[in-house]
Every structure is written in structure tokens, then in C-alpha cells.
Image (cartoon, helix red, strand yellow):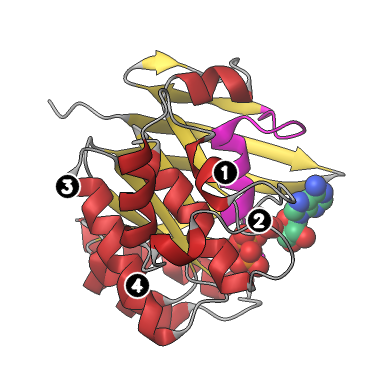
Amino acid sequence: MDSYLLEVKNLYLTREGRVLLNNVNLSLKPGEIHVLLGLNGSGKSTLAYTLMGCAGYTPDRGEILFEGRDITPLSLSERARLGITLAWQEPARFEGIPVGKYISLGMKEPDRQRVLEALEAVALPPAQYAYRAVDKTLSGGERKRIELAAVYAMRPRLAILDEPDSGIDALSLTDIEHLIRRMAAEGSTILLITHRDELAEIGDCASLMCLGSIAFIGNPQETRRFYREHCRLHPTPLELMRMGLEQEEGQA
Ligand SMILES: Nc1ncnc2c1ncn2[C@@H]1O[C@H](COP(=O)(O)OP(=O)(O)OP(=O)(O)O)[C@@H](O)[C@H]1O
């Protein structure tokens, strides 16, 4: 029997009368890179916040298991202590502190060498960036890379990366891919959230989220194809039903 690092079972979340997560089921094996694709507004970030235990994202029903343990009742900081981390879509601003210090905030023990490695891993030359202040003179893409460096530096058990590619140019997309592979090689399990289907190729497995549900799970090529053929912003009920049928046929 497979043992999973993360198992999401029958997760539902309703906010302001809207069902944002609708019976989500997802399993990640240790060391796996799992890509979660989906259009804008399909519920990817909502799932990320719910997995992380963010305030206001307590599920109505369902379970989140981490190494077989039910972590659904745990707070964000308790989950962080288990080694779960979320790289936000909009990186947090700690105005004024040096970049190197910011990167070391989440590390169990200060390790200057690891901070420098983390900056190199996101292609930011340490000599230029380690002592520079985290402030509005950094570009959006630089902030994003610093956030990723901080996640890398802390060696998380599970890293939830919410659109690490947004605001980053095509050239540095390669750096991001490289970083994600490196994290996985060092033992982190990755849930990579994106709506750029070309990024799915770095996954061991890929899922597609649609209207708060997982509409398809397969290998990256299958999921990409399904995404390209079926996903548009407002699928009709008939299209949704067809998606369900095709997924079932694919699994039969
Ligand atoms: N706190 C909230 N209250 C009500 N609706 C919300 C709340 N948070 C998110 N939503 C809605 O839930 C839906 C899913 O949003 P979410 O941010 O999870 O989508 P997403 O797939 O991450 O989209 P994107 O790719 O644009 O980041 C959207 O329609 C959004 O407006």
C-alpha cells in the first residue's frame, strides 16, 4: 500500500454562502512534485490556504492528513512546526530588514551558507542582494524569488507554492523549475499551483481544479491535454458532466 505525506479527503469549504471547495480529494507521496492546474478563480489558492490552516479557512467537512495524522484541527503555526509551508502568491513584506535576514527567519537554526545558497538557487547574486533591504525598491519578480529562496532555505517537508511563476519572466521560469527540482531532490514534497500548463511538465503528477473540485488527475501530459481541451472560464453544467465522464473512462 502507498503511504502518503499528504492526503486530502472529501474537503468542503463554504464562504459567504458560496461553495469554494467541493469534495476535494488529493494525495501526495513523499518527495513528489504535484502540479495543481486551474483557471483563475477555480479554488487553487483557497485550497492552499485551507491546507496551511490560515484563519478563516476552516473546512466545513473533510480531513487533511499529514503522514497519516489528522491535522485538520491544527493551527497554522502548528502545521508550520510539522514542516508545512506556503509561499504566498503575493510575497509578504517585511519592510526594511535585510534580504538575508528575511530568508533566515523560517530556518530552524541560522545558517549563513544556506542563505547564500538559497539566493544563488533563485539566481539572485548574494553579493548584491544579501544585505539589501526588503523594501519597495525590489521589483515584484525579485520579491517573488526572495520568497522562494526563504522557502528553499527552510527545507520544508511540504512546500505549497502558490503561483511562483506569476510576475516572473520566461528566462527565470527556468530558474524556478530548477529550484523546484532541487527542493524535491533534497527531500521536500511540492504542491505547485499554477495556471500555466507548460509548468505541469516538471510534475510527477498533475491535477486540474475546476469550480472548487478536482476535475482530473493524471500524468502531466494527460492533465495538460485535458486542461487545454476543456478549460475555459465558465463551463456549462453539461461540459462539467462530460469532464467527469471522461475522467471515469480514463481511469477504467
Ligand atoms: N474569503 C472569500 N469569500 C468569498 N469568496 C472567496 C473568498 N476567497 C476566495 N473567494 C472566491 O473563491 C473563488 C476561488 O478563489 P481562489 O483565489 O481560490 O482561486 P484561484 O484558483 O487561486 O484563482 P487565481 O488563479 O486567480 O489565483 C473565487 O471566485 C473567489 O472570488
Q: Residue 1, image x and y in percent?
A: 12, 25
Which residue does the numbered mark 2 point to in the structure image? 134
Which residue does the numbered mark 3 point to in the structure image? 185
Q: Nearer the viewer, residue 99 or 227?
A: 99
Query: Which residue is located at x 34 percent, y 79 percent?
Result: 198
Of the four image quadrants, the one with ligand 1 is bottom right
Q: CA distance from mark 4 to mark 3?
A: 18 Å
Task: Left or right? Give the position of 196 relative to 50.
Answer: left
Q: Specify few, some or many for label 4: CA neighbours under 10 Å numbering under 14, 14-19, or 20 or more.
A: many
Q: Can residue 164 be seen by looking at this rendering?
A: no
Residue contact between numbered discs 1 and 2, judged by CB atoms under 8 Å: yes
Three-letter amino acid code of the residue under disc 4: Leu
Q: Depth-wise, is mark 4 or mark 1 nearer the camera?
A: 1
Task: Left or right? Give the position of 25 relative to 87.
Answer: left
Q: Residue 197, image x and y in percent?
A: 39, 76
Three-letter amino acid code of the residue under disc 3: Ala
Magenta part of the protein: which range? 39-60
Q: CA distance from mark 4 to mark 1?
A: 27 Å
Question: In the image, which disc is placed on residue 82?
Answer: none
Which residue does the numbered mark 1 point to in the structure image? 102
Give the vertical position of 176 relative to 236 (above or below).
above
Quarter-of-image position of residue 243: bottom left
Q: Helix, strand or loop at disc 2?
A: loop
Dot 4 or dot 1, earlier in sequence: 1
Quarter-of-image position of residue 49: top right
Q: Depth-wise, is mark 4 or mark 3 nearer the camera?
A: 3
Which residue does the numbered mark 4 point to in the structure image? 199
Give the vertical position of 55 relative to 139 (above or below).
above
Three-letter amino acid code of the residue under disc 1: Tyr
Dot 4 or dot 3, earlier in sequence: 3
Query: Which residue is located at x 75 percent, y 40 percent?
Result: 14
